[in-house]
Image: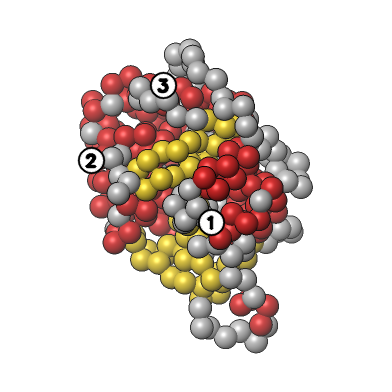
Amino acid sequence: MPHPIIFDTDPGVDDAQAIAIALRHPDIELLGMTTTYGNVDVETATHNALLLAELAGREIPVAQGAAAPMVKPRHPAPAHIHGANGLGNIELPAVRGRPDPRSAAQFIVDTVNARPGEVTLMAVGPVGNLAAALQLDPAIIDKVKQVVIMGGSVREGGNVTPVAEANMFNDPDAAARVLTAGWPLTLVGLDVTHRCVLTPAHMARIEAGQGALGEVLAGSYAFYRDFYYEFLGIDGCCPHDSCALAWLLRPELFITSRGHLTVAMSGDAEGQTIFAPEGRAFIEARWSRTPLVDVCLGVDGKAVSDWIADTLA
Ligand code: BDR
Ligand code: CA
């Protein structure tokens, strides 16, 4: 049985790779995409989500969501990483489709309520849409099947600050709410995504296998790859957002640990995810106050990267 999912995203080069998997994989039933600012502004995110679905020949609802963080001012979009258009500044075809008239939060609430116990919420951008959906209808906590979030870092350190990962840093207030809501949640963060490298050889296979969609994936990858070479000294890119789908479909490739998660909302540690393993007593009891979640701490990075390429080749 395929997994029914809502994919919450800020496309974004690595988001686009993940969207392609969600659109193509037979074990995924993509119920809709919800968009957020993050790698780009939210209008561009919506445009890109619609475009990627059209290039794959799919009609998928796309509901636009958060344009800014819940509380703090918005950080500038990282145009040097994803390009000003989110897809490596390559020329893009026109989009024909229109977004769903509902807000992302309303779309999430309606879809989860229509299929209680079935829907996986997968978020690979700042998580304001999930926070807004919780505000709209807190009862979805008991109705989602699970929540999978690409974000955070436990041992790896951050990619925006020494301790904060981008999706958490972009809206730490929303992240604190979503990560401690008490729903079944798995965090797929930099501890695993930095172990995965999508190489030029992988991308050549993807380009050859994906027609017009493959051209956009390969063109945007070329831009993103330059950033990774400068930033991490690797030839390729970390396919962060695809790792969340890999966890869903190939969990045996990951090592997870259960524990309590909190998010620092201000100060130098803003956006840091802090993990207290289950059963480990701390003198300060407050570190065990949040509901238990699962955090990915280990991965077979080569197998995940090969799986991404095999899925799209
Ligand atoms: C995350 O931040 C974004 O730039 C990527 O799309 C990914 O979701 C990685 O830190
Ligand atoms: Ca993303």
- Which numbered disc, 3 or 2, marks the residue that appears first in the sequence? 3
Residue 82: x percent and y percent?
A: 51, 32
Amino acid residing under circle 2: Asp
User: In front here: 113 or 40?
Assistant: 113
- The crowding category of the residue bearing disc 2, from other C-alpha atoms within 10 Å (few below 14, some 14 to 19, many at least 20), is few
Residue drawn at x 65%, y 59% is: 176
Taking the image as drawn, is residue 189 in sight?
no
Q: Nearer the viewer, mark 1 or mark 3?
A: 1
Q: Nearer the viewer, mark 2 or mark 1?
A: 1
- Element carrying mark 3: helix
- The crowding category of the residue bearing disc 3, from other C-alpha atoms within 10 Å (few below 14, some 14 to 19, many at least 20), is some
Quote the CA–CA distance across marks 2 and 1.
33 Å
> In the figure, 48 relative to 94: above or below?
below
Residue 109: x percent and y percent?
A: 59, 45
Residue drawn at x 50%, y 62% is: 184
- Which numbered disc, 1 or 3, marks the residue that appears first in the sequence? 3
Amino acid residing under circle 1: Lys
Residue 147: x percent and y percent?
A: 50, 55
* Residue position for label 3: 54
Q: Is residue 30 shown left or right of residue 169? A: left
Q: To which quarter of the image does residue 300 belong?
A: bottom left
Q: Are marks 2 and 1 in contact (CB under 8 Å)?
A: no
Q: Nearer the viewer, mark 3 or mark 2?
A: 3
Q: Is residue 91 shown left or right of residue 137? A: left
Q: Is residue 18 shown left or right of residue 308? A: right
Q: To which quarter of the image does residue 271 belong?
A: bottom right
Can you tell which mark lies on residue 128?
A: none
> In the figure, 215 relative to 308: above or below?
above
Amino acid residing under circle 3: Glu
* Residue position for label 1: 143
* Residue position for label 2: 310
Q: Are marks 3 and 2 in contact (CB under 8 Å)?
A: no
